[in-house]
Amino acid sequence: MRKTLFVTSDQLEKIIQKYPTPFHLYNETGIRDTARRLNAAFSWNEGYQEHYAV
């Protein structure tokens, strides 16, 4: 499985110039999509709640 960044190399260079390291970049779209898929996978279990960072 090949991983790809959610920002371009140029965008990353601009971020590095603006913010000192270390820093974290989060892909909000990816996080929300993962949460939706997780909830869908357990939709058969009424009252299911996620209590762990996914």
Image (cartoon, rainbow, N blue to C red):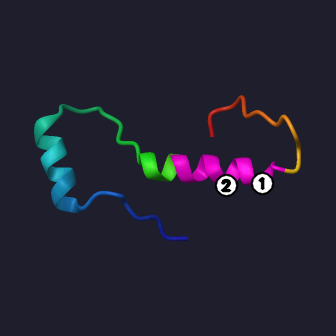
Q: Is residue 45 magenta?
A: no
Q: Is 21 or 28 nearer to us in this picture?
A: 28
Question: Where's residue 39, x and y in %?
Answer: 72, 47
Q: Residue tagged by mark 2?
A: 37
Q: Is 21 or 42 nearer to us in this picture?
A: 42
Residue at 70% over, 49% down: 38
Amino acid type, label 1: Ala
Q: CA distance from mark 2 to mark 1?
A: 6 Å
When the figure is inspected, residue 26 is found, relative to residue 47, above or below; the finding is below
Q: Residue tagged by mark 1?
A: 41
Question: Where's residue 54, x and y in %?
Answer: 63, 40
Q: Is residue 31 left or right of residue 36?
A: left
When the figure is inspected, residue 1 is found, relative to residue 39, above or below; the finding is below
Residue at 36% over, 58% down: 6
Amino acid type, label 2: Arg
Most extreme residue toward the bottom is 1
Residue at 35% over, 42% down: 25
